[in-house]
Amino acid sequence: MDDFKQYLQIINQSPTPTFWKNSELYFIGCNKEFLTMVGVADIDALARRKDISLPWASNWEAYQKDDMHVLQTGEPISRLEEIPSSDGGVILSETTKHPIWEDGKIIGIVGFCKDVTLEKRLQEVESEKQIEKINSKLTDLLEKFVNDAHLCKLEIINERLGLRHNEIKTSLSGDITLSKREVEIIYYLSLYKSPKEISKILSLVHDKEISVRSVQTIISDKLYLKFDVHTTGQLIERAAALNLIPLRMPS
């Protein structure tokens, strides 16, 4: 067996997908692993053909650019390439190309491929997990920031209302429970409506008589007590600090 045939036999048994081209960038050979990787039946489907006429023709310009670099400079080049597979997917290949020398001249190139599709997919999954962890931490930090800001706002309002810390009977945890009627009254109080005006509005909305006295009673006997305040102004400030004023008229 001559050296050339022996060399081809060794290459053909190599687990590394390998191909080689002449100086005009025509494929002139490859091993079985390369055929398997690109989903081509036999070497006859590649021999004497260029990338532009093969299944991965969509990327031929990028491949040719690297090939020409090797031919013109004699320097090897490595790149992550996307190679269309026979099943319609994409193979991610770390491809390294080297010049083939003969009598001091470059007569072609040889390429060695490493299928890193699974490896890269696993890296992407791990990256996505890391991003999810970061997003989760950011969400927690944002929630803490909002709660701290909310608490600070409430403390400022408490100081304005002249309430000491040990006098505060409510917290940010949602201890205050409001009835639908109480929510309605707080909403209209925030619009600077008087108990008399609120009485008229609610009577029209509910199509029944809502007395001024009942509105006043809810404000003074229930809402003042629940919010631990003594005036309507204090009530609105405390309700706003606790986000208990609806943005629109309660339905």
Image (cartoon, helix red, strand yellow):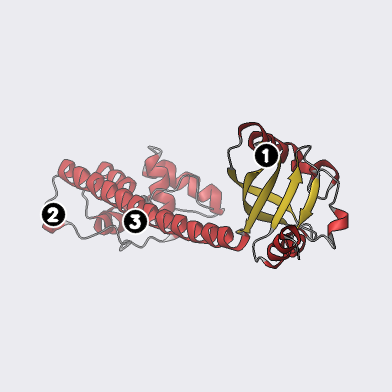
Viewer-nearest of discs 1 and 2: 1
At x 87% / y 55%, what residue is drawn?
Answer: 45
Residue 62 shown left or right of residue 149 in the figure? right
Q: Residue at x 24, y 59 (%)?
A: 170
Residue found at the very far right of the displayed protein: 44
Q: Residue at x 18, y 44 (%)?
A: 161
Residue at the far front in the pictured view: 2
Disc 3 crowd rating (10 Å Cα; few below 14, some 14-19, many 20+) is: some
Foreground mark, 3 or 2, reads: 2
The kind of secondary structure element at disc 2 is helix
Residue 50, by quadrant, is top right
**Residue 175 x, y percent position in the rendering:** 30, 63
- Compare residues 84 and 247 and report the one nearer the observer: 84
Measured as percent of width and height from the top left, residue 1 is found at 76, 66
Image quadrant of residue 73?
top right
Residue 53 in sight in this render: yes
Q: Nearer the viewer, residue 230 or 151?
A: 151
Nearest to N terminus: mark 3 or mark 2: 2
Which one is nearer the viewer's eye here, 176 or 148?
A: 148
Residue that numbered label 2 is attached to:
165
Can you give x and y, in whole percent of width and height, for residue 47 in the image? Answer: 85, 51
As measured in the structure, the alpha-carbon distance from the residue carrying label 1 to the one carrying label 2 is 92 Å
Q: In this view, does 168 lie to the left or right of 73?
A: left
Q: Are marks 3 and 1 in contact (CB under 8 Å)?
A: no
- The residue that label 1 is drawn on is 103
Residue for badge 3: 218
Distance Cα–Cα, label 3 vs label 2: 26 Å
- For label 1, the SS is loop
Instruction: State the residue in front, 49 or 200.
Output: 49
